[in-house]
Image (spheres, rainbow, N blue to C red):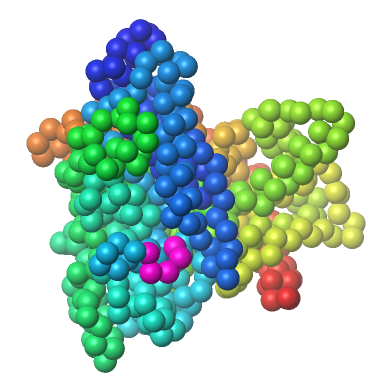
Amino acid sequence: MQKEQIASAIGAGDTFLGIEFGSTRIKAVLTDLAHQPIASGSFDWENSLIDGVWTYSLDEIHQGLQQCFADLKKNVQETYGASLKSVKSMGVSAMMHGFLVFDKDGNLLTPFRTWRNTITGEAAAALSERFRFNIPERWSIAHLYQAILNGEQYVPEIAYMTTLAGYIHFLLTGEKVLGVGDASGMFPIDSATGDYNKQFMQSFEELIVDKSFPWRLQDILPRVLFAGDAAGTLTAEGALLLDPTGDFQSGVPLCPPEGDAGTGMVATNSVAVNTGNVSAGTSIFAMAVLEKELSRYYPEIDMVTTPDGKPVAMVHCNNCTGDLDGWMRLFAEVLERFGVSPKKAALYDTLLLASFDGDEQCGGLMNYNYLSGESITGLTRGKPMFLREQNSRFTLPNFMKTQLFSCLATLRIGMNILYSEGVSLSAIAGHGGYYKTKETGARFTAAALKTPVTIMETAGEGGPWGIAVLAGFAAMRKEGESLSAYLDAHVFANAKKETVNPTAEDMACFDDFLARYQSWLPAQKAAADCE
């Protein structure tokens, strides 16, 4: 479309809007009705470690939403000379899991506990054993039960529990709902019914019956919706929260709020059985849409769902590019001392591509990127650590290759479980910041997972674009049309994509790295235990 046509579409409200709250950035993406991105806005933020809890304040959430939307409006105005006053449909997504609880008057009862916290080990283990179903530490139900075990005084006052996406959606619409994919990270979903597992819910009620709380679990959880369901409209209060200038109009329909895992599946067209994707940014997780259930439950594997309710095996790791980003900031600072200020994209591309000149054994270098704890490798807290052999070949190519391999190592450990179960994926789609330099991201992911990796042109847009697509699906779907059929026909039919096949040399190199990674892991654990 030409700029004049896009400006006209924006003025007519013929666009879709997606906003996603990531760990380090809030991003909004505006698309046309053909789901092509036409504008974006963002706001950088960081979680804080306060009293041992990773959190964001409600003020940060509200201000981040407004600043991100203001940046989008500015981009629209500067690019097209148009004012963004309405859209055809919109949606909100965010980091999954965590703990947001409110009383009957809407007051937050305890600071928001994000997915990054590893403080619910006792509760997660007890619930997993009781249900015979893996309940990870970051899941909302694990946080709730841990609060009960801790005797936290506010628990009887809980009237509503939700995720970050559910909270923002409630602010915008007044609706206490959640997309099934995000809901599956709060409490187990029964794929046969598309709702919370009633057997597990009853079991939980029996577990806490002696507490005599005035609430029942089913009453404090959000109502579960599927992709395409109506999820409310933007209220006047919600419109003012989003855009305090008053320009943006109320009445816009919203799709069900989703988690970043679900939007990642949509953004990579990975919602059909036997498809999969890897989302790699601050955290990294792989999703495999299953043909059949696993033979048993594994503590390392989350069972969640697609936005339309299909069962998904999820390998989730808390740490991916955070440590790498820290090193890149250091390199940028070095260059600035010499009077050179490279653009971020150029810095990353230049240094990451140097990894292709690295040795087969990464020069005897090793890196652990654990900014926070990692359940797959048994760490309750993190302490990033770089190591090297005495006779190592400490070069830039080896260093960068080690950093990029480190981002994938824990994921591969978890994926080995799925491989042992006979899970086979024809290809894996990659998206997120790790794939901004797609040559390195795709090549090394293919080597680590021993599977072809496809990168689509929308990989850099990721989750915000994915929730914009879900908004479009809710507005445009035909009766009975499935999400996968809609994506194939209307979103990815002419999508540009590149597929990278793993090479024997790269796979052998990564296998050698992983063997050393697991062998040296006790050193990381010892360091993390040091005060």
**Where is residue 181 shown, x and y percent of the image?**
30, 54
* Vertical comparison of 182 with 138: above or below: above
Q: Position of residue 131 (x, y in %)?
A: 30, 79
* Residue 327 counted in the magenta span: no
Point out the stretch of residues depicted in magenta: 108-112
Work out whether 287 lies above or below 456: below
**Residue 109 part of the magenta segment:** yes
Number of marks drawn = 0
**Residue visible at 90% across and 57% down in the picture:** 391
Front one among 3 and 396: 3
**Where is residue 86, by image quadrant?**
top left
Quadrant where the N terminus is found in the figure: top left
Residue extending furthest left? 479
Can you say whether 304 is above or below 345 in the image? Answer: below
At a point 69% along the width and 28% down the height, the residue shown is: 343
Residue at image point 37% right, 77% down: 154
Residue 354: give x, y in percent of width and height: 74, 35
